[in-house]
Each structure stands twice: as structure tokens, then as C-alpha cells.
């Protein structure tokens, strides 16, 4: 059996779009399942199904005739009601699993996040055996962890599935990390140690890992249920990475520094104020973000290299060159953020 008919949930998103493009290049029949219609996907010749992950009937219908599902869609960010995260990330993933079973889908590749195991401490060169923490400071990592557990459970019951944990995905057309940094460039300050290291991954490398996972699962079902960290394979100071993003946009490096304790206290205060006043936009700081920015978090990707044959093809240097080229283009000018 070969991979032929594939569906990407969230195909119009940042990672989803790059993944879709690569799948098309492999001459596969590609469908995107999203709430919205994307002209750029239409230009690629991608079939689009509009629907809601929270509606099981929508998902079951969309998965009919598919042999491989890439479940990329999720509710990201660090602020919002718990229910809003749960309905998309957990209930939505449950619907994806059920739709796979009803339609006899051969493979499910699930996009998770290393944040599911973040316990607020430094995490250095850890592998996939690290357990989930007992508590979480934000709804996103907690609900992604619950969804991840659902996928593992389904895999143990016979659904061929692999879970990937890409960390800090970035690159041209990024609509989350890079725009947020650039829009806050004038008021951003370093938090905590200046030499702590983090993983990151260029978007094309993340997409490649997803395709490798599907291909390997096709020929080796014993990999089902496995979890893999994927990254550039070279941890870097988060502040050096942020300064590189700023430099790519023609902006000066960060100035000023705030202690980790002060940032955490500020996050706690902002969360309290925003909850009390029911403010929906993201607060300037949260406890989770304060802890994340003040700690190291990078992981051993040996398992992905061994099992999936994963290696980051696009270097960080080349990725930054491409990012700069996009940012300086008419469509990607940082001034639009």
C-alpha cells in the first residue's frame, strides 16, 4: 500500500501550508480541512473542505477515502478560556481519532509540542521518556498533553499513529512567533539568564519530519505510538535567536533585562487583571511565558534520527537568510505586523 490520498487539518496555517506544498510536490492527492477558505491553497490545486474540528460529523465526512491524516490544526497561544482550548485541542483530536477509525485511515501523524512536558524547570538534552508534569500554568500545554495521550491510547488499540513534538517553528510566512517578536521589539527585554539554550525548528524541516513519519509508519508499524522531539539539532540561546529575527527585519537587538522573578510576578498580576476584567487579547506577560523565557529547554533528537531518518536539511543560517528575504519583500515587511 502506498500513500496516495492525504488530508491536512489546518492546511492553511503556517506549518500546514508548507506541509501541503511539499506533499503536492510528491504528486499526492492533498486535501485541507479548515474552518476557512484559503486562496493560496486553491492556487496550489489543493482540495479544501471547510468544517469544524469540534463537529464530529464534519470530520468524519472529510476523512472519507483518505489513507493518511496529518493532524496539524490546534488552538495555539497562551491566553484564553480553558474550554476554548479543550474543545479544539482535546475534543477536536478525539474527533480526528474517531474519524480515522470509522474511515479505516491507515496512518495518523499528530503535531504536538514539547510544552506538554514543561515542568517550569530547566530541561536540557532530555529524551522522550520524560514524564508529563502534574500541573500546568496554561491551557495550551495542558490540553495538548491530553490530546497527545488520546493519540497514544488510540495507537495502542490499533490505530497506526506517530506523535511529533516540534519546538518553536519559524520561517517565512510565520504568523505567530516572528510577528509577535517584531511587533513588541521596542518593549521586549531579556528575562533571566542570557546563556540558557532552547530548541527551535525551521518550518521546512518540521514539514519534512511529518512526511518522514508517515513514510516510515507505512513500512514499520512497530513505530506506532512513538513520540519524537524534532528540532534543528543545535540548541541556541533564545536571546541570540530573537536578536537574529530582529536583525533579519532590520531592527536593533534587544536592550534591557528583567529578572525571572519580576517577570513571573508581572505575569501573575496581568493574568489576574485580564481575568477579572475579562480582557480577551493577550496580556503582555503570563506566568507560563515568564517561566519559559527564563529556562533552558532543548531535547535529544536521536530517536527521530534513528527511527525516522530525520535530519534538519535547512540550517539555521540558511533559514535566517530566507526569513530576511521574506521580511524585506513587499508581502512580508515587518512594518505590517
Image (spheres, grey):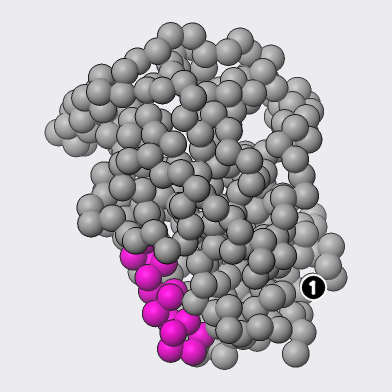
- Would you identify the image quadrant in which residue 291 lies? top left
Q: Residue at x 50, y 44 (%)?
A: 298
Q: Quadrant of residue 315?
A: top right
Would residue 100 be seen by someone viewing this image from the given angle?
yes
Whether the magenta-drawn stretch holds residue 157 is answered as: yes
The chief SS type of the magenta part is helix
Number of disc labels: 1
Residue 320 percent location from the top left of the image? 72, 31
Please determine whether, in this image, residue 250 is positioned above or below residue 55. Answer: above
Residue at 58%, 78% in the rendered image: 223
Residue lying at 72% horizontally and 75% vertically, measured from the top left:
215
Determine the residue located farthest toward the left in the rendered image: 276
Q: Which residues are magenta?
A: 145-159
Q: Residues within 10 Å of mark 1 (few under 14, many from 20)?
A: some
**Residue occupied by mark 1:** 28
Between 80 and 40, the residue placed more toward the observer is 80
Q: Quadrant of the C terminus?
A: top right
Amino acid at each position: 500500500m502506498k500513500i496516495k490520498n492525504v488530508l491536512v487539518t489546518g492546511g492553511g496555517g503556517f506549518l500546514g501550508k508548507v506541509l501541503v506544498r511539499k506533499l503536492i510536490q510528491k504528486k499526492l492527492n492533498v486535501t485541507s480541512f479548515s474552518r476557512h477558505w484559503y486562496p493560496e491553497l486553491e492556487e496550489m490545486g489543493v482540495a479544501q473542505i471547510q468544517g469544524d474540528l469540534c463537529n464530529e460529523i464534519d470530520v468524519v465526512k472529510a476523512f472519507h477515502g483518505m489513507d493518511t491524516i496529518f493532524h496539524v490544526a490546534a488552538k495555539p497561544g497562551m491566553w484564553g478560556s480553558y474550554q476554548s482550548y479543550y474543545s479544539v485541542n482535546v475534543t477536536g483530536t478525539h474527533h480526528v481519532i474517531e474519524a480515522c477509525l470509522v474511515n479505516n485511515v491507515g496512518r495518523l501523524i499528530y503535531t504536538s509540542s514539547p510544552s506538554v512536558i514543561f515542568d517550569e524547570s530547566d530541561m536540557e538534552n532530555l529524551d522522550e521518556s520524560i514524564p508529563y508534569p502534574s500541573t500546568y500554568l496554561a491551557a495550551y500545554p495542558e490540553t495538548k498533553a491530553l490530546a497527545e495521550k488520546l493519540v497514544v491510547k488510540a495507537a495502542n488499540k490499533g490505530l497506526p499513529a506517530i506523535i511529533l513534538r516540534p519546538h518553536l517553528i519559524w520561517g517565512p510566512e510565520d504568523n505567530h512567533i516572528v510577528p509577535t517578536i517584531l511587533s513588541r521589539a521596542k518593549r521586549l527585554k531579556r528575562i533571566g539568564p542570557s546563556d540558557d539554550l532552547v530548541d527551535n525548528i525551521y518550518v521546512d524541516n518540521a514539514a519534512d519530519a511529518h512526511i518522514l513519519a508517515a513514510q516510515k509508519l507505512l513500512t514499520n508499524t512497530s513505530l506506532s505510538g512513538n513520540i519524537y522531539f524534532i528540532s534543528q539539532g543545535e540548541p541556541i540561546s533564545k536571546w541570540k535567536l530573537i536578536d537574529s529575527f530582529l536583525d533579519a527585519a532590520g531592527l536593533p537587538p534587544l536592550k534591557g533585562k528583567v529578572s525571572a522573578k519580576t517577570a513571573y510576578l508581572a505575569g501573575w498580576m496581568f493574568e489576574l487583571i485580564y481575568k477579572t476584567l475579562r480582557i480577551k487579547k493577550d496580556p503582555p506577560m503570563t506566568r507560563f511565558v515568564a517561566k519559559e523565557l527564563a529556562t533552558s529547554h532543548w531535547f535529544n533528537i536521536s530517536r527521530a534520527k534513528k527511527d525516522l531518518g530525520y535530519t534538519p536539511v535547512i540550517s539555521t543560517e540558511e533559514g535566517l537568510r530566507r526569513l530576511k528575504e521574506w521580511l524585506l519583500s513587499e508581502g512580508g515587511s515587518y512594518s505590517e505586523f
